Image (cartoon, rainbow, N blue to C red):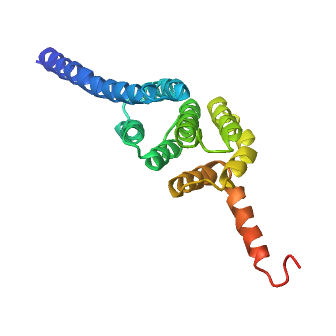
Amino acid sequence: MKKLLFALTTIIVCSCAPAALAQDESLITKFVKSATGSSDSQLGSLATTLTDKLKAFGGSLGDNPSVKGKLDDILKSLTGGKDSAALGHAFSLASSAKLTSSQMDLAKQVGNVASAFVVQKNFSKLEGSQTDVASIVNSLRDGKLTSIISPLKNVASNAHLTDPQKNLLSVLTDKYAPGLKKAAGALDGIKKLPGFGK
């Protein structure tokens, strides 16, 4: 009886696993296809790097459906044009409970590459900021986070930013350069003091 029960359990588990994997793979395929279909060749490369990081992180999780669900949420949001939501999901990975140090490192890499993808997608054609945007994207992809502060500040001061771009920059600044926002707020406060600039 035990052998029969074990055999049935094995059949059920094995028959369910490919369906879940196929769903993940179709989501990955859809995301990569939408990125490579763009006129920006850099997006396709970033999408491939991101999906590689997502697969590595997902493969390291074992049975952790809540965190694996966040990985799907990242891809769904990016494919659906909800870039702020995608970053929220990506940034929350590193705060997931019970991650090993190597899983934590992979989670951070996912967040960085997702950020690079979002920056490239939303800012690569921003007038007067192409060099800074390229610097941010390359630094995020390579995990050199201290290198993004100055270019991030430069992009944030661009007069051609749209409201959605400002919102994305706010999310990125909160994550990668929280001191930048505090310093800007303090500077605004100083400028409002009586007699400033006289």
Q: Locate the C terminus by quadrant.
A: bottom right
Q: As displayed, is residue 169 above or below residue 57?
A: below
Q: As displayed, is residue 84 above or below residue 79?
A: below
Q: As displayed, is residue 122 above or below residue 181?
A: above
| Rendering coords of residue 17 (x, y %) | 26, 23
Residue 25 located left or right of residue 129:
left
Residue 77 located left or right of residue 15:
right
**Residue at x 74% of width, y 41% of height:** 146
Q: Nearer the viewer, residue 181 or 110?
A: 181
Find the residue positioned furthest to the bottom.
194
Find the residue positioned furthest to the right.
198
Q: Nearer the viewer, residue 6 or 131?
A: 131
Q: Quadrant of residue 186?
A: bottom right
Residue 96 located left or right of residue 21:
right
Q: Locate the N terminus by quadrant.
A: top left
| Rendering coords of residue 77 (x, y %) | 39, 42
**Residue at x 46% of width, y 45% of height:** 83
